[in-house]
């Protein structure tokens, strides 16, 4: 196959202390935390909205965790005050309105003086002649290809796009065959108060029994606005970081969504109409960097604690079958630490990873991937990046005691 080299001067459009790539939970928290440390922050988001899968993919429920602290706790307090637990270790799983959260995050980052670039897609990490600590991110924007200079780049893409471009080693999926957890298109149905005629497109599937459903089970919530059903019942095999896989998943998941809605309208939800399908399929798992430490299944199941802790969670091991078949491996865990070293790519300088692409095994990743934990990792990454600039040191060498002190000042509480 032919290859082409891009030889083009790229105009520097702006510069910042820290550039955050990706506006999901990790990226949002990272940007806020770094801005609160006095840094100029530019956040690059490839879509037109912040919130990641929580808004883009309609994964509008914060899966249950017991460390409701820091920026995540602040978000709950400001948007869902009736759901705020009295103690940070009380496990909650609140459902939220994705449109409200989208608007809230826009306003929140503006108040925090974070400069957000929407419709700005990562292209490459650049190192110019004569630069010392500075580097630049090439970005595809509505103005074309431009660059943003920064001292530190935070990779919150979910796919480790920046770290891999910088030369970081990575792996995908389970160790035996590289298969990742399948993708799901979550959608909403609303109670109309009267019977709704079930709609099934000509190319849809007719599901007769629960065993016929893509996940082989019913999985939905109605904990948010009364009469609003959030449905998590589609399943498409594939790796969301692969072109062919994501192309197939976008079409197949929509086909399944119509068919699942049709099934529900015939089985207990006769008054419910299909009212919201998000603009893209939800992706659970793609790439994991090889970091200074790799979080393992043993760490998760044994409740391991680390001196360089940056996030804590007790979300269960939750592996949707990578084969795309029905069935889910679900195992309760008591709670464990995620160490800072998991965020630091081996052999790469100036880039830190936060979110589901950190250094973790397939099984460990299935537990740490949820939004609440990503907010926690992002907040720690934002502070760590700021400290690296302050201390003029590599990201791997920051003072962990100082990191913990700043996080505590930002209302982060760690279980000892």
Image: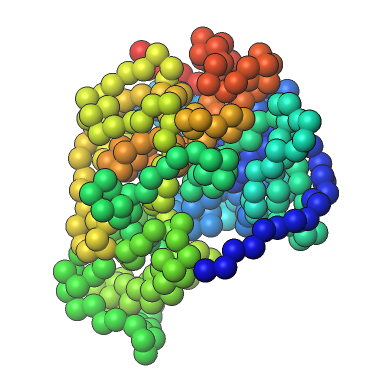
Q: In the figure, 162 relative to 37: above or below? A: below
In the rendered image, is residue 320 in sight? Answer: no
Quarter of the figure with residue 415: top left
Counting from the top left corner in percent of width and height, residue 101 is at 57, 48
Quarter of the figure with residue 130: top right
In the rendered image, is residue 20 in sight? Answer: yes
Seen from the viewer's position, the closer of residues 323 and 316 is 323
Seen from the viewer's position, the closer of residues 408 and 384 is 384
- For the point 75% across and 56% down, which residue is it? 7
Q: Which image quadrant: the C terminus? A: top left
Q: From the viewer's perspective, is 292 left or right of 100?
A: left
Q: From the viewer's perspective, is 355 left or right of 36?
A: left
- For the point 34% across and 83% down, which residue is it? 204
Counting from the top left corner in percent of width and height, residue 268 is at 26, 70
- For the point 38% across and 74% down, which residue is it? 252
Labels in figure, total? 0
């Amino acid at each position: 196959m032919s290859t082409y080299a891009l030889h083009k001067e790229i105009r520097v459009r702006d510069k910042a202390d820290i550039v955050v790539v990706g506006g999901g939970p990790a990226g949002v928290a990272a940007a806020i935390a770094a801005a609160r440390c006095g840094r100029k922050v530019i956040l690059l988001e490839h879509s037109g909205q912040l919130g990641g899968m929580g808004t883009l993919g309609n994964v509008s429920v914060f899966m249950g965790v017991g460390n409701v602290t820091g920026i995540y706790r602040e978000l709950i307090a400001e948007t869902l005050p009736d759901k705020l637990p009295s103690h940070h270790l009380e496990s909650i799983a609140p459902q939220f309105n994705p449109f409200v959260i989208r608007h809230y995050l826009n306003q929140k980052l503006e108040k925090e003086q974070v400069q957000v670039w929407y419709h700005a897609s990562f292209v490459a990490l650049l190192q110019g002649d004569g630069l010392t600590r500075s580097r630049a991110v090439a970005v595809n924007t509505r103005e074309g290809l431009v660059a943003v200079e920064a001292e530190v780049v935070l990779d919150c893409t979910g796919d480790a796009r920046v770290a891999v471009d910088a030369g970081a080693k990575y792996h995908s999926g389970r160790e035996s065959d590289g298969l990742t957890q399948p993708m799901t298109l979550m959608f909403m149905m609303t109670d109309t108060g009267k019977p709704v005629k079930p709609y099934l497109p000509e190319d849809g599937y007719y599901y007769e029994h629960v065993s016929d459903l893509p996940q082989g089970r019913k999985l939905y919530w109605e904990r948010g606005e009364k009469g609003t059903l959030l449905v998590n019942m589609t399943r498409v095999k594939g790796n969301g970081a692969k072109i062919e896989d994501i192309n197939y998943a976008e079409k197949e998941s929509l086909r399944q969504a119509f068919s699942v809605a049709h099934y529900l309208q015939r089985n207990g939800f006769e008054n419910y109409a299909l009212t919201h399908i998000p603009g893209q399929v939800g992706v659970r798992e793609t790439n994991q960097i090889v970091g200074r430490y790799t979080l393992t299944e043993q760490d998760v199941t044994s409740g391991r604690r680390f001196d360089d802790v940056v996030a804590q969670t007790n979300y269960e091991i939750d592996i949707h079958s990578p084969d795309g078949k029905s069935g889910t491996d679900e195992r309760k865990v008591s709670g464990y630490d995620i160490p800072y070293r998991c965020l630091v790519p081996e052999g790469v300088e100036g880039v830190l990873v936060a979110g589901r692409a950190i250094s973790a095994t397939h099984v460990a990743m299935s537990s740490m991937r949820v939004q609440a934990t990503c907010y926690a990792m992002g907040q720690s990454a934002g502070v760590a990046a700021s400290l690296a600039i302050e201390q003029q040191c590599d990201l791997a060498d920051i003072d962990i005691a100082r990191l913990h002190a700043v996080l505590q000042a930002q209302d982060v509480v760690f279980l000892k």
